[in-house]
Image (spheres, helix red, strand yellow):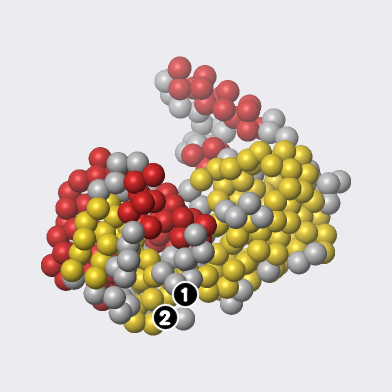
Amino acid sequence: MATSATSEQLLVIIDPAARQGDGESVRIAKDVLSAGAAAKVCLPDSPEEFARMLGRRGSRRPVVIGDDRALVRAVSLLHRHRELSDCVLSVVPVGSMGLARSLGVPPGAVAAARAVLEGSVRRLDLLVDDSDGVVLGCLGIPPASVRAAVPEPVGAPPAHPWLRSTYRTLVRTLASRPAARLRVEIDGETVTDLDHPVETVSVTPVGRGVASVEIHPFADSGSAVVTSARTITVTGEDFHYRADAVTSGPVRRRTWRVAEGAWGLVVPRGGPEAGC
């Protein structure tokens, strides 16, 4: 559900990675925001300064200029201080922006900055785990394999000898990757257990207090499970997981619950629904 963004005073926090990586996009975004609203611009040099500036926002609406990690950092800080439900965030993506785009933020400094000024507030679900971590978009267990980064089919290795050797080593490593033995519980019910190895588990908030869950078995050991849930518990061997832009672990047990409408993000009026 979207409502109008009402605050005309902005706290613009420019992540240092954005300043270093694409200063021109940062300058354009800052100019558009400053021309359209009363904007206080902050230039933190560390995560600690980022947190202090966000904490001193007062009545100003925070705008993060940065990549997906900067957005997740801001949401995590507000959640940790139990201020997330009362604070509306805006973001101008500079750098990696897959998460921001999946949530409805337009690409490009000008379009994203205009959305900050003219857009509406969309209430979004997120996942909260039992260590108080948050997931805004997609959760993957284990983290996505480097297999996705290999452009060539197995039968056509690169032409250069040193690349061919590296490529074949990578293929052998992927081929020998062990299956994950995990117990996955959906809303208290076990849907797959340790004796049924899995290749991937993915969880994505889809709105209205539920998440989409997909469990893919290893090789031909069974059929994929596609379902929805409000609470997901994963137990088993030490495993890593990727939450948005960050890989965490290893852990042996983790529970995620869906927090409905937990945070507000400014997006273009009438834009597409968020998705991953």
Residue drawn at (76%, 67%) of the image: 187
Farthest top residue? Answer: 161
The location of residue 122, given as percent across then percent down, is 43, 75
Q: Is residue 219 left or right of residue 17?
A: right
Label 1: which residue?
Answer: 123
Question: What is the three-letter code of the residue carrying label 2?
Answer: Ala
Residue drawn at (61%, 46%) of the image: 241
Q: Is residue 56 above or below residue 1?
A: above
The location of residue 59, given as percent across then percent down, is 31, 70
Q: Is residue 97 left or right of residue 187?
A: left
Question: What is the three-letter code of the residue carrying label 1?
Answer: Arg
Q: Quadrant of residue 154?
A: top right
Farthest right residue? Answer: 195
On the question of residue 198 being in view, the answer is no
As drawn, the label of residue 179 is: none
Residue drawn at (52%, 19%) of the image: 165
Give the Cα distance between marks 2 and 1.
Answer: 7 Å
Q: Is residue 249 left or right of residue 123?
A: right
Label 2: which residue?
Answer: 2
SS of the residue under disc 1: strand
On the question of residue 53 being in view, the answer is yes
SS of the residue under disc 2: strand
The local crowd at label 2, few if under 14, some if 14 to 19, many if 20 or more residues have their Cα within 10 Å, is some
Q: Earlier in the sequence, mark 2 or mark 1?
A: 2
Q: Are marks 2 and 1 in contact (CB under 8 Å)?
A: yes
The location of residue 25, given as percent across then percent down, is 21, 52
Q: Is residue 134 left or right of residue 219?
A: left
Residue drawn at (32%, 62%) of the image: 57
The local crowd at label 1, few if under 14, some if 14 to 19, many if 20 or more residues have their Cα within 10 Å, is some
Q: Is residue 204 above or below residue 199?
A: below
The location of residue 171, given as percent across then percent down, is 59, 29
